[in-house]
Amino acid sequence: MRHNFKNLKIWILAMEITNDIYRLTATFPKSEIYSLVNQMNRCSVSMPSNIAEGSNRGNKHFQHYLNISLGSSFELQTQLLIACQNDYLTKEKTEKLENKIIEFQKMTTGFINKLDNNLSS
């Protein structure tokens, strides 16, 4: 079964997170451009990109891409906390964005499980 990625709630949320990250990292110190900024931007881009790429495959392969997207979200969550530790963003901004990332992780995990159930039935 093929999925239209633009209609998937997880893709929409991932796109929103990517947008938030780009806006946020634009405010980081210039010294971070090639390290934390670059890593956070790449992780955030990886989330919706892998959903889109996998959506055109069968469910088994789609799950693989969803897992990569999920992995990127955990990586991004860690980098967000590192940015907060370095006072590049406020606790409030960190929490707000971290909650979105956690929501994405829950939704994506649920979606992977749903695909899993479809494969076994």
Image (tube, grey):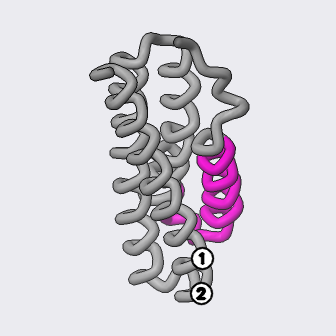
Q: Read off the residue under disc 2.
A: 92
Q: Which x, y percent locates residue 104?
A: 51, 54
Residue type, label 2: Glu
Quarter of the image with the C terminus in it: top left
- Image vertical order of residue 26 relative to residue 46, above or below: below
Q: Decide: few, some or many residues near mark 1? Use Cα within 10 Å; few <14, some 14-19, many ≥20.
A: few
Magenta span includes 19: yes
Q: Check if mark 2's residue and mark 1's residue have beta carbons within 8 Å.
A: yes
Q: Residue at x 60, y 76 (%)?
A: 96
Q: Give the overall secondary structure of the magenta segment.
A: helix
Q: Read off the residue under disc 1.
A: 96
Tag count: 2
Q: Is residue 18 left or right of residue 44?
A: right
- Image vertical order of residue 103 relative to residue 85, above or below: above
Stretch in magenta: 12-33
Report the front residue among 46 and 66.
66
Report the front residue among 86 and 74.
74
Residue 25, image quadrant: bottom right
Q: Is residue 5 left or right of residue 98?
A: right
Report the front residue among 83 and 16.
16
Q: Which x, y percent locates residue 56?
A: 55, 13
Local secondary structure at mark 1: helix
Residue type, label 1: Lys
Q: Residue at x 48, y 21 (%)?
A: 54
